[in-house]
Image (tube, rainbow, N blue to C red):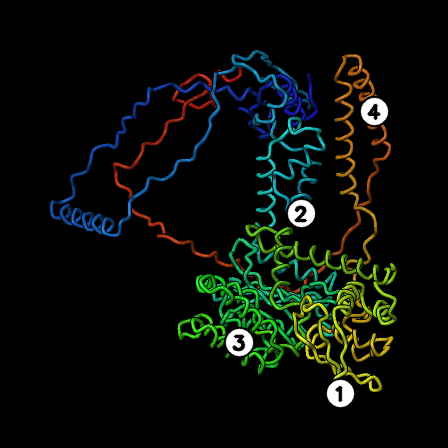
Amino acid sequence: MRYDTLEGAKEHYNAHAARKGFSVKVNSSRRSTITGEKQKQQFTCNKFRRPRKDDGGAELQVDVGPIPDSVSEDEADIENAELASVVADLAAQGRKEKAPKKRKRENIVHTFCKAQMVVKLIDGRWEVIHFVPEHNHPLIHKPSLTKYLRSHQGMPKEEKEFVKNLHNTNLTAGKMMEIMSEFYGSELLVPYTTKTITNYCATLTREETKDGDLAKVVSYFVELKEEKDPDFYFRLKLDEEDRVENIFWVDGAARKAYAEAYHDCVSFDATYLTNKYSMPFAPFIGINKHGQSIMLGCGFVKQELATSYDWLFESFLIAMNGLAPDNIITDQDGAMAVSIGRLFPSSVHRNCRWHIMQNAQLKCGPTLGRNPGLAEDFNDCIDFSFSPEEFEAKWALFVGKWPVVGGANSYFTTLYANRAKWVPCYFKHRFFPFLQSTQRSEGFNAILKRYTNPKKSILHFVQQDEKLQTHVLVKEGGNDYRTDCLELRPWSPFPVEEHAFKVYCRDIYLRFRNEFELIGRYNVLPFGCNFYKLEPNRGWCAKYGTRTYLVTANKEEGTYYCECSKMDRDGILCCHILKIFTHLGVDEIPDRYILKRWTQGALSGYVPKQRFFEQPDVMPPESQVQLRHANLNMGFTKLARIASRTDAATAIVNKHLRAAATEISHLNKSLKKKKPVSAVPSTSAPDQPTKPRDPAKTTTKGRTKEHRTVSALELHPKKKVQCHTCGSFEHNSATCKLRFL
């Protein structure tokens, strides 16, 4: 046989090996002494080497040569004393020298198999000049096992591109194998293993950051700013060695939204690690017009210190043109609180109530367990105090009733000392819509786990973060469509509910309706001029307890106020004021009680230049090829399952396959055209920032490895090279005269 290329010869012999059940090894070759081009190539069975001799487990005699006697007795005594002191120190510290772990390898059992094919370049084509088909070992007859042979572990190019797309969606290798199994019909038919997918994904990860992770991130940011989003902003902080310590970035859409409407409340948290450098991820989370969490900027900090947060908050202020958030909620981090006080002095800072109550459960659990009723009184004091004065009075009664909580070392005393940072009544007039904790930040972190992996690079995280932002925009677009184009049956016939349906975004209207459904739980009692008492008619109401609420209402002036202050806190009216609306016949919500941020007009039109909306609504050609390849695989697998039942059906399929291959070959030749080569003018590259270095990884715990001088008894002689063709130690297999026999 003759082949046009050496690669064609290898592929043909490898295909023959796959059918027979053995693996191919590219062995020795010969090059021209004049041109240096390869002229002869040998392909062998991978068991071509001589089998290893069984020495019965005996140890080799190591010849270390004569030991020099140039060391004097005094020097030997000094060395022995130093060695003894080192051993004593190690013994005192309780440390033991551990032998290095040996990698467990499973080696191929060689049988000196002579099966081979030798090709030679004759008249420009590679001709088979020697072929040995016989093997001296059993072959693999199960087709599902050939994928474990070395030469058959490759992955087709189209499937590599498809697996790359799956890798970019943060799927595990096991999930990728499940998807490919669906394409092939069974995992037994997939021509590669899960380990092959894992190795390929690891190669992709290494290649994307081989020139430096943070250098790639900076290039990505610069390209994003120049080509897609001119308002994109990023900032880096480098140390003395040009290693990145902190990084911050925010896109133009978030900057615009924050400046126009969403600077009234921000949630900030830095407890989630999302990169291989163990740098905490610190997102600024806001709430959009649909009550949906959005990212208003994010960053990585090297250390959770006040100086790091100072830099991060300063970068946030620069990006937002000096506009600090009106209200900000974080966890109980001391460094974070100090930095917020310095950089956001006008912002109201609130601590996460959920974390505080969780710590109270952990530290006060035994006390709560030994005193039934204490937890109920504590929760009532925290949740149903509507002013600081009322809280102080309730707390005094609480401490008087339960003396166990009033001690100087009690955790309840610590909670009381920090009451102005977390008790809800201290924030009843501040805008913290539908939250008392950092749940939005933690919810965003939970979503990030679907998009990224803590072992991946920062470049991978940045790319996945852009996909997440696109997902948020798509979801916001869906909510806009629901608000503008879909109808919803109202809960009641009251005109005020119909008005709320028209002015609010759909999700905010649903929150309004949930509140409106509670109006039947209260009875209205006049309490003087423009004052009304609302008493629960069933003794208790969800979210409001057993309390009676006082509402001030002036229909002529259009002013209404309830002591629960839900309007100040969440931006929508409470069920108590809505009950007064139905009682007084108010058919529309006054304009002063409709926050613009909860309506479709919250933001002016903002379309990032060429970022999302100028892309065609069709799949790219590369993706179309991958999709067609996957669909054809599934179709051929189904056809093979049917045709393989009889020889006649198999013959029909093979006949049509050959005809289809011929027809497709003619089609490709007719469609093949030479593309005109256009000269591309050279342009000078834009000024790039200083190339940053990757952050230093966090030092692991434990003692660092020490380098020491190796003694002569630990040295091993150099292993002699043996020819695997004839067994001689005088030459190797490449120079053996018997290699082509």
Q: Nearer the viewer, residue 27 or 270?
A: 270
Label 3 to label 2, Cα distance in Å? 44 Å
> Residue 666: horizontal and vertical position, in percent?
85, 27
Q: Is 678 rendered above or below residue 639? A: below
| Residues at discs 1 and 4 in contact (Cβ within 8 Å) | no
Residue 366: quarter of image: bottom left
Query: Residue at label 4?
Result: 660
Badge nearest the viewer, 1 or 4: 1
Q: For the point 53% across and 70% down, which residue is it?
A: 378
Badge nearest the viewer, 3 or 2: 3
Amino acid type shown at disc 4: Ala
Badge nearest the viewer, 4 or 3: 3
Residue 559: quarter of image: bottom right
Q: Residue furthest left?
A: 73
Mark 3 burial class by Cα count in 10 Å: few <14, some 14-19, many 20+? some
Badge nearest the viewer, 1 or 3: 1
Mark 4 burial class by Cα count in 10 Å: few <14, some 14-19, many 20+? few
Q: Give me the disc on residue 528.
A: 1
Amino acid type shown at disc 3: Arg
> Residue 342: horizontal and vertical position, in percent?
54, 79
Q: Is 735 rendered above or below residue 695? A: above
| Residues at discs 3 and 2 in contact (Cβ within 8 Å) | no
Amino acid type shown at disc 1: Gly
Mark 1 burial class by Cα count in 10 Å: few <14, some 14-19, many 20+? few
Query: Residue at label 2?
Result: 169
| Residues at discs 1 and 3 in contact (Cβ within 8 Å) | no
- Is tag 1's residue or tag 3's residue first in the polypeptide sequence? 3
Label 1 to label 4, Cα distance in Å? 92 Å
> Residue 194: horizontal and vertical position, in percent?
59, 35
The reply to whether residue 131 is visible in this rendering is yes
Q: Nearer the viewer, residue 387 or 487?
A: 387
